[in-house]
Image (cartoon, rainbow, N blue to C red):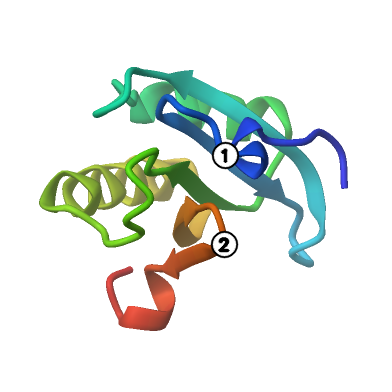
Amino acid sequence: MHGQSACAFGATIHVFGCIFLDDRHRVIVVEDLFFGTIDGASVHPRVIAQKALAHNAAAAIAYHNHPSGVPESSQADLRITQRIKDVLCLVYVRLLNHLVVCVGECTWFAERGLI
């Protein structure tokens, strides 16, 4: 796997990124894309689509942390996930999952039927 996310180290600010995958779902690169404050980050689906195209990705998995330590997805998380999915679909990149990462815990949107 190429790259390592700040989320893996229990960041104290919001970090949002993507794992970009090839057509066989092998990892191309892991990128932290947006950095915020303790209670949120501005995420731009257009930038995610640009990165996906630059890496020639066929699929992506979004991730972000919750510095609060609570891995539950918020309504804002659900809305941005849908927007990212819609934008990536326009360039034929599939959003496979979205993870909310906390120290010792992780919530998978696909596992809960949210994607």
* Secondary structure beneath label 2: loop
Residue 104 - label:
2
Q: Are marks 1 and 2 in contact (CB under 8 Å)?
A: no
Q: Residue at x 47, y 58 (%)?
A: 99
Q: Quadrant of residue 100?
A: bottom left
Q: In this view, does 114 lie to the left or right of 6?
A: left
Q: Residue at x 79, y 52 (%)?
A: 27
Query: Could you tell me residue 17's position as x and y percent?
Result: 53, 35
Q: Residue furthest right?
A: 1
Q: Which residue is drawn at 45% across and 18% down?
A: 35
115 w.r.t. 91: above or below: below
* Secondary structure beneath label 1: loop
Of callouts 1 and 2, which one flags the residue occurring earlier in the amino acid sequence? 1
Residue at the disc numbered 1: 10
Q: Which of 88 and 14 is in front in this view?
A: 14
Q: In this view, does 5 lie to the left or right of 14?
A: right
Q: Can residue 93 be seen in this view?
A: no
